[in-house]
Image (tube, grey):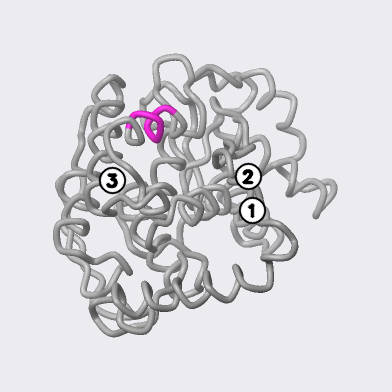
Amino acid sequence: MPRTLQPYGARRAPAPAWQAWRVKPLRLALAATVALALTGCSASASGSPERSLDDPAKKDIAMRLVSSAENSSLDWKAQYGYIEDIGDGRGYTAGIIGFCSGTGDMLKVVERYAKARPGNALARFRPALRAVEGSDSHEGLGAAFTAAWTKAAGDRAFRAAQDAERDEAYFDPAVARGEADGLSSLGQFIYYDAYVMHGYADAKGSVGFRTMRAEALAAADPPSEGGDEEAYLNAFLDARVAAIRKEPSHSDTSRVETAQRVFVREGRLQLETPLVWRVYGESFRISGG
């Protein structure tokens, strides 16, 4: 899927050079005043310093939240060897965020692993993975492939390949877009989870992150444009619920309604713990960290 972020919008022409020395201090002073007024020395409501989702502790929470939906477990590090066909039309779903044989990201993981560990047991399945992209076919894969995937999870290089593909294709673009839109850690996570489940661009039978964001922007201004974050996030989640309902294999909206929407309503913009939610009929809790 495309990984290039959309332009952030037009900018005003820079101030004349003779004014530059005055403009910058004024902007800095104004920014500091606003930050103090709105956040109390850049702190969240809980008193904790605001951090981006790429902060290690926040990122771990994000991984656990995704794992609760993708794997029915908070132990995301135990999911590298997971693989099965869940019947969603995307072939095999596997690994820490649900890489799929039908969408091409599973192939990218295998290719990364082949570069790091030439001749590994998964490398021979690359032609078959290329052939099944865009379908739910198992042709050329089957039990031999799933067994090799599970066994490879014991190799640090394979785990690193999954981590790298997750970050490059999903996590990093979502966080960057969220930061540009002025979103908190929660907002960045909401973007990231949409990337994981739907991809960036629209595909046959599914609506991608790009369209969801466009619909949200049409309904509410993001914080970077002076909008209220809660209102904007609810607009984005409304767009995502509509997208989920258009996919026959993803009609359950609890990933939004009894999880992310709950966090927005509770004002947990920095993913403050405890976090309590339900997804796909199961209850989860992150108590601290």
Amino acid type of the residue that numbered disc 2 sits on in the rendered structure: Ala
- Where's residue 178, x and y in %? 46, 52
Q: Is disc 2 surrounded by few (<14), some (14 to 19) or many (20+) residues within 10 Å?
A: some
Q: Which residue is mark 2?
A: 148
- Dot 3 falls on a residue whose secondary structure is helix
Q: Nearer the viewer, residue 189 or 226?
A: 226
Q: Position of residue 16 (x, y in %)?
A: 70, 57
Pinpoint residue 122: horizontal percent, then vertical percent: 70, 41
Query: Residue 152 shows which numbered tag?
Result: 1
Image quadrant containing the C terminus: bottom left
Residue 36 lies in the magenta stretch: no
Name the residue type under label 1: Ala
- Residue flagged by tag 3: what amino acid is it? Tyr
Q: Identify the magenta region.
A: 211-215
Residue on which disc 3 sits: 232
Q: Residues within 10 Å of mark 1 (few under 14, many from 20)?
A: some
Nearer the camera: disc 3 or disc 1 = 3
- Residue 254 is marked as none
Rendered residue at 41%/38% (across/down): 197
Does the magenta-highlighted stretch encompass residue 212? yes
Contact between marks 2 and 1 (CB within 8 A): the answer is: yes
Query: Of tags 2 and 3, which is closer to the observer?
Result: 3
Asked if residue 218 lies left or right of residue 252, the reply is right
Distance between the Cα atoms at labels 2 and 1?
Answer: 6 Å
Residue 145 quadrant:
top right
The quadrant in which residue 104 appears is top right
